[in-house]
Image (cartoon, rainbow, N blue to C red):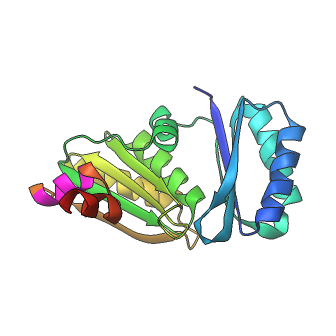
Amino acid sequence: MHPSLALIEFDSIAAGIEAGDAMVKKAPIARLVAGTVHNGKYLVLVSGEVADVEESLAAGLAVGASAVLDHVYLPGVHPHVVDSIAFGRRPQPVDALGIVETRTVAAAIAAADAGVKGAEVNLLEVRLADGLGGHGLVFFDGLVADVEAAVRIGTDAISGTNALIHAVVIPQLHAEMAANLLADTRWRGRVREVG
């Protein structure tokens, strides 16, 4: 686990590559993950020690300033957020379901981290960009009151921006809907199982 994580989302691939290079040259970060995602965006994620990630982020924001769509800096990122980004889904039984849908990847990461830190919930999944037209999705599970708190805390973390598309809490998710959600949130994956 690394104590710090930062991500910058660029609307230019070339500018993102240039900024990513500046980021990794600026400070000795533990990990760099960079690449293209749907809708012509470029993402650069760095993790490592707090001061190093902070310096790296500052360099990326300075070099890629005109192409920055959004960014997130989490000096004490929750381990479940890191797991969701790195390993994908954590399917488990769904009681109440909370969903936060964002326009940017950075906002989804910020909402996920705030929600899972602020309430007793499970982080089922953080889906980022690919297959979503560049958007982000966060799925929380738990008791209704806890999921409501996580969604509220998550959306508060990104308030003041236009990043939030929609947030909802669904108490007692229907069993068929839960089965679909736990199997795969992507349409293609579900259709293949039926066919």
Q: Quadrant of the N terminus?
A: top right
Q: Quadrant of the C terminus?
A: bottom left
Residue 24 as seen in the image, left or right of residue 164: right
Query: Does residue 174 appear in the picture of this structure?
Result: no
- The residue at 53%/51% (across/down) is 109
- The residue at 48%/41% (across/down) is 81
Could you say where residue 144 lies in the image, as x and y percent from the top left? 20, 52
Residue 3 as seen in the image, left or right of residue 179: right
Query: Does residue 20 appear in the picture of this structure?
Result: yes
Residue 176 as seen in the image, left or right of residue 114: left
- The residue at 46%/38% (across/down) is 87
Could you say where residue 118 lies in the image, as x and y percent from the top left? 41, 43
Looking at the image, is 195 positioned above or below residue 24?
below
- The residue at 37%/44% (across/down) is 89
Could you say where residue 105 lies in the image, as x and y percent from the top left? 56, 59
Could you say where residue 93 lies in the image, as x and y percent from the top left? 19, 42
Q: Residue furthest left?
A: 175
Of 137 and 195, which appears nearest the observer? 195
**Region of the chain picked out in magenta, as a range:** 176-182
